[in-house]
Image (cartoon, helix red, strand yellow):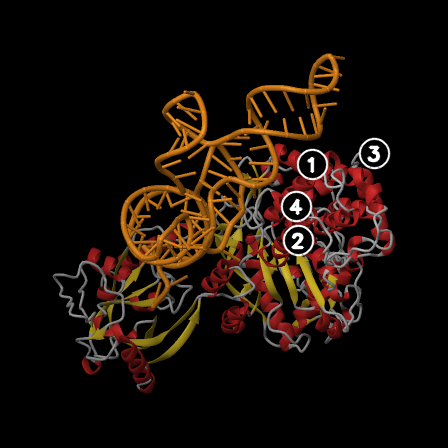
Amino acid sequence: MAEYDPQAIEQKWQARWNADRAFEADADPSKPKYYVLEMLPYPSGTLHMGHMRNYTIGDVIARYRRMQGFNVIHPMGWDAFGLPAENAAIQRGIHPRDWTNTNIESFKRVCHRFGFSYDWRREISTCEPEYYRWNQWFFLRMLERGIAYRKRSRVNWCSKCMTVLANEQVVDGCCWRHEDTPVEPKENEQWFLRITQYADELLETLDQLEDGWPERVLTMQRNWIGKSRGTRVQFSVEGISGKAIEVFTTRVDTIFGASALILAPEHPLLSALVAGVKNQSEIEENIQKLRRRLTRAADIATAEKEGFFAGRYAVNPFNGEKIPIWVGNFVLMEYGTGAVMCVPAHDERDFEFATKYDLAIPIVVQPGEGKELTPQTLTAAFTEYGRSVNSGPYTGLSSEQAIAKMSADAEAGGFGKGEIIFRLKDWGISRQRYWGTPIPVLYCEKCGMVPVPDKDLPVVLPRMTKFTGMGQSPLASVPEFVNVKCPKCGGQARRETDTMDTFIDSSWYFYRYADAHNDKAAFDPALVRYWLPVDQYIGGIVHAILHLLYTRFFCKVMRDLGLVNHNEPVKRLFTQGLVLKGGTAMSKSKGNVVGAEEMAEKFGCDTGRLYTLFAAPPEKDLEWSEQAIEGCSRFLHRVHRLVSRHADALKAAPAGTGIGQSLDSATPKEKALLRKAHQVLRRVTNDYESRWHFNSATALLMELVNEIHAQEPLEQGARPDVVKQVFDLLTLMLAPMVPHLAEELWEMLGHSDHTLAHAAWP
RNA sequence: GCCCGGGUGGCGGAAUGGCAUACGCGGGGGACUUAAAAUCCCUUGACCGCAAGGUCGUGCGGGUUCGACUCCCGCCCCGGGCACCA
């Protein structure tokens, strides 16, 4: 009896799948399609079990859907541009392209080694001109529509990455790659994509994803977009004509309770306001002090409220009342108008501020329901809706009514209007680094900024050889790249030397899989219409905002370009848990990785796959345990032994009894075994179908094996055709999770007609 | 502070109102073996008991129900997200 030899079996079946082109799928409108996608990896270092868990889950789904008769597209590619490659180049003197390609080769080898059912014809690598020329093409289309634009602004600079970061790449005031490095504000001229133009739609269509996306991802995106409905109101400044201060408020109904205006220290009107007031120099000094203290975004949230009177008064347009203008450290220049009205009785922050600086606290909203607020009983701000009091003509209205009426009146009176604002900012995409897509514009002495004509795409990234990581845009030091003729006037021009954020690359890559080698267009819309949107996307929660927001934005832009006809790129999203070792996520920098290849060497990849599925439900974090793997290995050996021991008898079984046929003549014992097998089938199907609890699916299969083992049905004289049916079911159920072993068992059971790759799910 | 998850043996975890702890790991005992590995069998929540058996037991306190890990109310703890967003 042959022992289970995973290495041999795995090689054998991988060769067979290759020869059969078992996982290649082409668009075929007569078949229902299913798109299974795993987030494409950044090829750095070694592929570890964290990656493998992601791909194993995807592979199980792809194989299960294939068995169900779907035309399954299951592609893989490489997020090949990015900083670590460039940093490796600086540290080791290797070119980023060579470093990246070496890593891609090894990642690919391991993917093959694990038997993932990818259609490799669709492979892409984002650092190849064949791919990134379409980044440039998209950029030019956005430029034409005003979605891409250039402006000077305050941006986030990471001193370790030596580049500007997008807002989405800043976590708790620090760089997302360097959690201990606060980003520094920096004035910079750079390119932005006007994602805010889609803010409302990005928020609205999240509702369509309720059934398919994790609640927390939807919440995170909603928070990030941060829609607020409110009113913009202008306060004139006493003694200065023509210089109104605008505030944004969601509670215009409380404006009769405003006891001050508070401006952000960076407010552009401040210097004009302060000019000529008593104590001018002292106030200016205080402003400088506040500004300096606010350089670290991380500190702002925790800092104590501070402020001071700026020397002038504003006029409340609703009642003509004079209120002092203050400067406060808690007012954010980046949000709203950079100025707020201070209504202490009905806003917690204002209450705190007013208490500290002894400002008036007039009550203008009463809760009703028999409760009455008085200055004596008000120990905290009352921030809920109620009924307006002491609010002139609005007294007696509910808060909702007052907001509506006061917004309308402000607009009629020309001193304000209802407005919706978002927290979301435009996407800054310029990076002062080398290893990325060149931005396809140039600057002509005569014509100014000129887009590179489509016919001149791609703008190929030159092969630089010296990397220092110092200073600005490495490409600026390559004269052959920088100096060009202007395509408009033929005069002297300079190329843009910043490169694109690599999140552009990953924003549309899964559309390219549908038509990976098209050299006339990013993709053929007909193919995309067949394959997209993605039916099931699987990846880490880290991309809950970053990648998943950007890709939704790209989808909407592509729709408006007439390239796609859907509104959301991904129907269902699954975020798998981390693979931990010693309590922290496996990562090269922490030095706690378990390499996928060594895993496959030691136990075989089927065991590795099974372990990541069995050790925990897929959404939970999983602590790596070598002992638990041995349990999985034992189980697979046990199954192999069980089948091979009975293979000869079962092969000879009469072919009469197929799965699902009734067995009137079976003995009670035979029926009990069959019943068990079908119970397991029902529950395992449910696990594959919707619950994705592969750990309990595996447990059920173990139970079935234990049951067969305990009963020894053949030895006890059970009908071979009945036993065969049970073994067939077991094998089919194992197939998505441990495909190599399942194929081997299938063959041992005498099925020589076809591989399991496309066998029908029972 | 607000919003999501979660809390079950020594450990990973199972149980979609119906035998709590499936399955696996680890532990204990045994068979086979000269021996070991592998394999196979038995056992393994806590407490009381020689035993048959009994009592307790899913973070804590209440409630609904014939019946609650599961539903409701109030807390505690852990993880994650958001947060001077006006």
Q: Is residue A123 above or below residue A465?
A: below
- Res. A621 in view: yes
Q: CA distance from mark 4 to mark 3?
A: 23 Å
Can you say which quadrant of the picture contains the N terminus of chain A? top right
Identify the mark at residue A678; answer none if there is no mark. 2
**Disc 2 + disc 1, Cβ < 8 Å:** no
Q: Amino acid at mark 3?
A: Met
Q: Is residue B37 above or below residue A712?
A: above
**Tag nearer the camera, 4 or 2:** 2
Q: Chain of mark 3?
A: A
Q: CA distance from mark 3 to mark 1?
A: 18 Å
Q: Position of residue A166 (x, y in %)?
A: 54, 58
Mark positioned earlier in the residue sequence (3 or 1): 3
Q: CA distance from mark 2 to mark 1?
A: 25 Å
Q: Is residue A576 above or below residue A566?
A: above
Question: In which quadrant of the rendered view does residue A497 lie?
Answer: bottom right
Q: CA distance from mark 1 to mark 4?
A: 14 Å
SS under mark 4: helix
Identify the mark at residue A25; answer none if there is no mark. none
The answer to whether tags 3 and 2 share a subunit is yes
Identify the mark at residue A633; answer none if there is no mark. 1
Residue that badge 3 annotates: A1
**Tag nearer the camera, 3 or 2:** 2
Mark positioned earlier in the residue sequence (2 or 1): 1
Residue that badge 4 annotates: A701
Q: Chain of mark 2?
A: A
